[in-house]
């Protein structure tokens, strides 16, 4: 088991949505590590991460909702969105810096 697998917990809801939308664990991990946009989640204490996967014919986004708890990332949900969303409620700068630092530490280890 890699250290990544130990740090990420997948809820049954997230697994079901990933099956429904044909999303793999590696795709969701890529969104967590390299999001195009980060916003506050709609649920309490959650973060929503988005990756634009628009092709030449249709625009599409993949979203995942996570929660950080005790150095673990809990993947709560994942979904495909047909079209493009407008930036709505970006995360406060302090939290963006914290996430960036955590990703830098993880990538340097």
Image (cartoon, grey):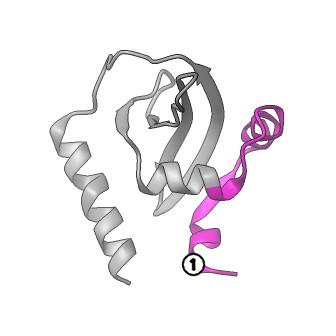
> Which percent across, then down, holds residue 77?
65, 35
User: Which residues, given as a range, are shown in magenta?
Assistant: 1-26
Quarter that holds the C terminus: bottom left
At horizontal 52% and vertical 55% (from top left) the residue drawn is 30
Residue extending farthest left: 93
Side (left or right) of 18 relative to 3? right
Q: Which residue is mark 1?
A: 3
Few, some or many residues within 10 Å of mark 1 (<14, 14–19, 20+): few
Side (left or right) of 6 relative to 15? left
Q: Nearer the viewer, residue 32 or 75?
A: 32
Does the magenta portion include 109?
Answer: no
Q: Nearer the viewer, residue 33 or 74?
A: 33
At horizontal 54% and vertical 32% (from top left) the residue drawn is 55
**Residue 38 higher or lower than 26, as above or below:** above
**Picture quadrant where residue 3 is located:** bottom right
**Dot 1: element:** helix
> Which percent across, then down, holds residue 54?
51, 31
> Which percent across, then down, holds residue 108?
33, 80
Q: Nearer the viewer, residue 106 or 42?
A: 106
**Residue 11 higher or lower than 86, as above or below:** below
């Amino acid at each position: 088991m890699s250290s990544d697998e130990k740090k990420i917990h997948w809820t049954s809801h997230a697994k079901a949505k990933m099956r429904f939308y044909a999303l793999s664990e590696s795709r969701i991990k890529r969104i967590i590590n390299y999001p195009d946009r980060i916003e506050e989640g709609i649920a309490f204490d959650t973060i929503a991460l988005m990756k634009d996967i628009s092709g030449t014919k249709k625009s599409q986004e993949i979203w995942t909702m996570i929660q950080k708890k005790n150095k673990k990332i809990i993947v709560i949900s994942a979904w495909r969105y047909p079209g493009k969303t407008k930036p709505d409620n970006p995360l406060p700068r302090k939290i963006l810096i914290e996430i960036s630092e955590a990703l830098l530490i993880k990538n340097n280890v």
